[in-house]
Amino acid sequence: MSMTSVQVSDDMMKRLESTATRLRRSTGRVINDALREYLEREEQRTQRLAETRAALDELQAGAVIEGEEVMAWLDSWGSPAEREPPL
């Protein structure tokens, strides 16, 4: 496992130590958990942004499905005449 160091304010260090004590974990474990969660959130944010941009590109290219088609498909769910999803 790699190591790094960071500078934190005295207040933040007190909060970190308090949290670690309350959770009965080491400060290193709390930092690792927090960093992991932060990185996962940022990766998800980046992925959502890429998906949004791709969707906007599709929209600008005219790749849209009319609402009436979607509603007709939804209305057919569970019926003997269930439709295929609109493309």
Image (cartoon, rainbow, N blue to C red):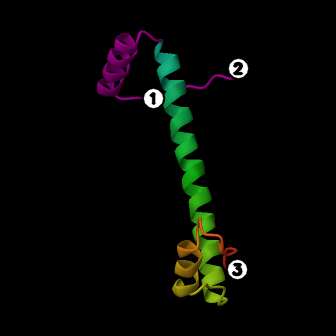
> How many numbered callouts?
3
> Answer yes or no: do the residues labelled 1 and 2 have beta carbons within 8 Å?
no
Going by the numbered disc 1, the residue's amino acid type is: Gln
- The one nearer the camera, 78 or 70, is 78
For this orientation, the residue located farthest to the left is: 11
Foreground label between 2 and 3: 3
Going by the numbered disc 3, the residue's amino acid type is: Leu
Q: Quadrant of residue 49?
A: bottom right
Quarter of the image that includes the N terminus: top right
Determine the secondary structure under disc 1.
loop
Q: Could you tell me which residue is drawn at 60 percent across and 26 percent down?
A: 4
The mark nearer the N terminus, 2 or 3, is 2
Query: x and y percent of residue 85 in the render?
Result: 67, 74
- Left-right relation of 41 to 59: left
Q: Which residue range is magenta in the image?
A: 1-25
- Left-right relation of 54 to 42: right
- 23 within the magenta span: yes
The mark nearer the N terminus, 1 or 2, is 2
Q: Which residue is mark 3?
A: 87
Q: CA distance from mark 1 to mark 3?
A: 53 Å
Dot 2 alpha-carbon crowd within 10 angstroms: few under 14, some 14 to 19, many 20 or more = few
Q: Which residue is mark 1?
A: 7
- Left-right relation of 41 to 60: left
Q: Which mark is residue 1?
A: 2
Going by the numbered disc 2, the residue's amino acid type is: Met
Determine the secondary structure under disc 2.
loop
